[in-house]
Image (cartoon, rainbow, N blue to C red):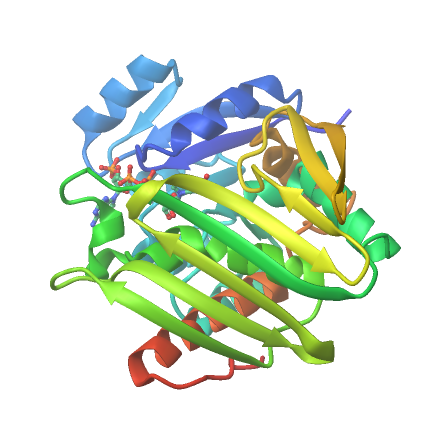
Amino acid sequence: MDKILNWGLLSTAKINRALIKPLRASKRTRLLAVASRSISSAESYAREWNIPRAHGSYEALLADPEIDVVYNSLPNHLHAEWTIKALRAGKHVLCEKPFALTTADVDKMSQAAHDNGRVLAEAFMYRHHAQTLKVKEMVDSGVLGKLQLIKGSFTFTLTREGDIRSKQETGGGSIWDIGCYPISYARMIVGTEPLEVFGWQVKSENGPDDSFIGQMRFEGGIHAQFDSGFRSPDRSMIEIVGTNASLSIPNPFKPRKTAEIYLSHGDKQEKIKIKGNELYLGEVEDMCDAITGKKAPRISHEDSRANVAVILALLESAQLGKPAAPARA
Ligand SMILES: NC(=O)c1ccc[n+]([C@@H]2O[C@H](COP(=O)([O-])OP(=O)(O)OC[C@H]3O[C@@H](n4cnc5c(N)ncnc54)[C@H](OP(=O)(O)O)[C@@H]3O)[C@@H](O)[C@H]2O)c1
């Protein structure tokens, strides 16, 4: 029987709610502590969510000898700094997406994980769901024929004033927040990195992009197109087109326990039902497997780094008005 791993939440972020249930559902984890920049906020959060320990600073969580794994749910601009601090404190880290805002930071995070012998993985929860694994298996089996095009969208209407997503200084912008999903999905499906990208953005007043439209060109004549945005209704979808058939995934990034995808040959459409786990449980179990030496994390550091490199190239392209090539490792 594996040791039960004690987890600590680094901040009182809204997204923590998604992790709390799986951390309680898994037989291999215990949610032990939460940290906040103020002790009163940590204590009230701990009371609300029935978490045994509250720490009044992030440093105190990292100094807690009973914490094995830190969930880094800080705003994007703090992912690298606090992930590196946590790894140096001997903790394993599940870090929210986007992993970091520069490839140099990803390299430093990766180096810190290596130097300290700790597991570090990006919290792209959709990657672990049975639906995603089935889609990848179908594409690789050749059922679509030769892969040609991947289209993806992820939008919602951002109404919260002062949200971290709307500020440049906290690593905001729709491409970093949700565009990262269709980009990651397309890269996963193709299995190689784009050679060239082109992007357009609509910027908010004094802030980062409110919406982003991007294209990626892969080797072998494969292309991907996506859009992300904060000023449209809730939309998310992926369509994968091959020479023989296409696959439509109406809920690619937040699939429910039972998911449905559609395989189309011309006007004939087949519904495929997929049974999966609770969405966020996958990343928790994946971390446990990696920490106990059963397998490497499903999302490698190279994969996370490449996603950051593509986003940076798309932003460069949108700024310069011409294609850009993602930086290679
Ligand atoms: N995988 C997913 O499904 C998913 C979904 C949503 C968000 N995310 C990711 O999760 C991260 C957090 O997103 P969120 O919407 O949950 O964030 P949020 O509610 O705004 O929380 C961020 C937390 O970070 C702490 N913090 C430290 N410095 C801060 C600063 N300068 N400004 C604001 N907060 C600061 C605060 O906690 P204290 O006050 O307690 O210190 C705050 O509660 C982001 O990286 C986002 O991309 C992932």
Viewer-nearest residue: 91 or 103: 103
Which residue: 76% across, 49% down? Answer: 266
The answer to whether residue 144 is above or below residue 312 is above
Above or below 320: residue 48: above
Q: Nearer the viewer, residue 261 or 106?
A: 261
Confirm whether residue 79 shows in the render: no
Q: Residue furthest front?
A: 267
Q: How many marks?
A: 0
In the image, residue 295 above or below residue 186? above
The quarter of the rendered structure image containing the N terminus is: top right
The x, y position of residue 43, in whole percent, is 25, 21
Indicate the quadrant where residue 213 lies.
bottom left
**Residue 275 drawn at (x, y percent):** 73, 25
Residue placed at 54% from the left, 37% from the top?
68
277 relative to 324 in the view: left or right = right
Q: Quick check: can you spot residue 184? A: yes
Q: Quadrant of the C terminus?
A: bottom right
Classify residue 158 as left or right of residue 200: left
Of residues 153 and 16, the one nearer the viewer is 153
The picture quadrant where one finds residue 167 is bottom left
**At 56% from the left edge and 69% from the top edge, which residue is drawn?**
306
Q: Residue at x 47, y 24 (%)?
A: 20
